[in-house]
Image (spheres, coloured by chain):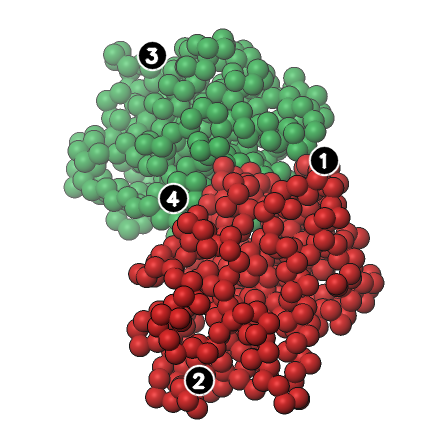
Chain colours: A green, B red
Amino acid sequence: MLRQIDPEAIEHIAVGAAVLGTGGGGDPFLGKLMALQAVKEHGPIPLISVDELDDDAWIVPAAMMGAPTVMLEKFPSGKELGMVFDLLQQHAGRPIAATMPIEIGGFNSLIPVVAAAQLGLPIVDVDAMGRAFPEMQMVTFYLDGINPSPAVMADEKGNRVLMHTVDSVWGERFARSLTIQMGGAATLAAFSVTGRQLKESGILGTLTQAEAIGRLITESQGTDEDPVRTVLDHLGGFELFQGKVSDIKRRMDTGFVRGEALFEGIGEWAGRRMQLYFQNEHLLALEGGKPRATTPDLIAVLDRETGSPITTEGLRYGNRVSVTAIPCHPKWRTTAGIEAVGPRYFGYECDYVPVEERLRTEGAAR
Amino acid sequence: MLRQIDPEAIEHIAVGAAVLGTGGGGDPFLGKLMALQAVKEHGPIPLISVDELDDDAWIVPAAMMGAPTVMLEKFPSGKELGMVFDLLQQHAGRPIAATMPIEIGGFNSLIPVVAAAQLGLPIVDVDAMGRAFPEMQMVTFYLDGINPSPAVMADEKGNRVLMHTVDSVWGERFARSLTIQMGGAATLAAFSVTGRQLKESGILGTLTQAEAIGRLITESQGTDEDPVRTVLDHLGGFELFQGKVSDIKRRMDTGFVRGEALFEGIGEWAGRRMQLYFQNEHLLALEGGKPRATTPDLIAVLDRETGSPITTEGLRYGNRVSVTAIPCHPKWRTTAGIEAVGPRYFGYECDYVPVEERLRTEGAAR
């Protein structure tokens, strides 16, 4: 079991988290560079499991909020994490025991590594999505009625905001609006939890899982193995489509990058077409106008040859890819989970059907 | 000299502050009702002068932010002021010695009376504009380099936000954006100052001044005196125009009410037209396309018969009014003051000329 985050682990987590990030969660390359730099300066970060936390320990997740498009050009100064944690600690008058990722994504899995390094904290092997989602309240903590307050945001100019909102939805509204004012990307610490809350509500072991996925992809490259197949076997996922990117549209809208990508089939998929819709993350895969996979199941686009994950930002005309789907964590398959992050929440006129069930009844995936 | 705010003083302040509020600063009737209720419950509020404050006393202004149009329908629950002051006090770890109005306007002069009553604080006879202005950084404190942080906002739902911004302009951006999210109106405490800062940077005696103006208007009603003339003589102001409202346009835009009012001359002004442009407050008076008065001088619309001030919200087709102009406080006539609140800041293509100078060289006012 992974016991610390060192440069090798960072390389693997960056890749594996970008698979689970379903196209979003921020750019893995930038996240990796920031985390490598932090570990180079401060040494490896202890990775602890939730079992090692006292029930009343205080754990603060660290994340970047905003559109990945913006973060590519406007990245943190490096001081925001300290400002955010300091303000929170000063306000609450209690010490922070550990940090954690709020979601698993290329950037947002590694931002807590930077925070942990700077602040001398351990990082907990857990997150609150088991994947990446675009909105702040889309966390398992929300399903368990945990309020995100006090939430703290900061930007690279030195502005800091602390919020006490009546619920997660108001937290998302205020934080999104401030993120836009802050230039489209901001550093956020929300949903601080106790050790007890985290044991009950977190999705456990997801940094270890990301590391394992990244390692599998890297190690299968240059061998006879099909890295896509290897990853899907490991995760119980499915290949929905093989194709070339034939069109990609992105637009900035209310602080998100929204858009769609079109794929023309190659090989045995020749003559077929797949469409992906995204809001930071991939949310819906259509073939011939019919849903093949939807949120909250994970839709990941992997390079057909190397198995490397491609973010919505990284998709380019002509990329030869596998579009894959991976069952989400059971917490998202409950009625409350589907209401919070299912296709209808995002305005898509279709019901959630677990991907493995959809494929069993509709066939054609492998 | 006024030594306490009792129901009679509230009646007068509501009227006088609406004159100085230049059409904005919130609805005087609502402000009056809230203040009367607070004083009925808690007794009269001690009014102190800045000289009575220790240099290191901590004074917190209380205000409503947003569009007057919205405040007419969405008014505070009454708990926001307590939430705002509590959060600020808890965060700063020091006691609040007094409150004050940040601006003089029908609503925002009386909101601190409500805060003072609820929290058992005195109110200081001072403000930071000597009138009302639409944006948060348009205070004399800004001219003296005072940062508005920590600023706290709250809404009637119970949401609270504390901001530390690098300067006033960022404070305005965040607060405006949150005000819009909060539904277009919110309770705000920003620009907390020490007694020393207030003595140097405040505009002194403005609650007493508002009370005196209100008293003059009320007492001249039903007599042979012309209440408009009485007020203008008291303030050294000018009547720019007498006319009837012939058109009024208002729109909500980026959290403000913006618009213009058109007046057709009556009496000796017959055949002439005046146009007023406003953003919450009246900012520019044109006759025949030429400026007659501009911000930061005060442009107030008074009922021709009663002398009662009419807010931009209260203007109705057919109202017979005097359009008046009153010289602003000298602090706004400096280069820095004109840069902060002069006509060009608001996008009007004309220079600031003190109203008395403009009228002396261009004639026609009395």
Q: What residue type is labelled 1?
A: Gly
Q: Distance between the residues labelled 4 and 2?
A: 50 Å
Task: Find numbered disc 1 in the image and state the secondary structure of the residue it sits on.
Answer: loop
Q: Mark 1 points at which residue?
A: B93
> As shown in the figure, which amino acid type bears the numbered disc 3?
Glu
Q: Same chain for marks 3 and 1?
A: no
The numbered mark 3 sits on a residue in which chain? A
Tell which tag, 3 or 1, sits nearer the viewer. 1
* Number of numbered discs overlaid on the protein picture: 4
In the image, what residue type sits under mark 4?
A: Phe
**Label placed on residue A256:** 4
Observer-side mark, 4 or 2, equals 2
Q: In what quadrant of the picture does the N terminus of chain B appear?
A: bottom right
Judged by depth in the image, the label closer to the viewer, 3 or 2, is 2
Where residue B110 appears, x then y in whole percent? 67, 63
Marks 1/4 same chain: no
Residue B48 or residue A278, whichever sits in front: B48
Classify residue A66 as left or right of residue B26: left
Asked if badges 3 and 4 are on one and the same chain, I answer yes
What chain does badge 2 belong to?
Answer: B
Of the two numbered discs 1 and 4 in the rendering, the one whose residue sits closer to the viewer = 1
User: Could you say whether the residue bearing mark 4 is in a helix, strand or loop?
Assistant: strand
Q: Name the residue under label 2.
A: B243
Q: Which mark is residue A219?
A: 3
**What kind of residue is marked 2?**
Gly
Viewer-closest of A50 and B176 = B176
Marks 3 and 2, how far apart at CA:
84 Å
Q: State which tag comes first along the sequence, 2 or 1.
A: 1
On the image, which quarter does residue B267 sit in?
Answer: bottom left
Q: Where is residue B269 in the image (x, y as percent from the top left)?
A: 40, 86
| Cα distance in 3D space between marks 1 and 4 | 38 Å
Q: Residue at x 48, y 25 (%)?
A: A79
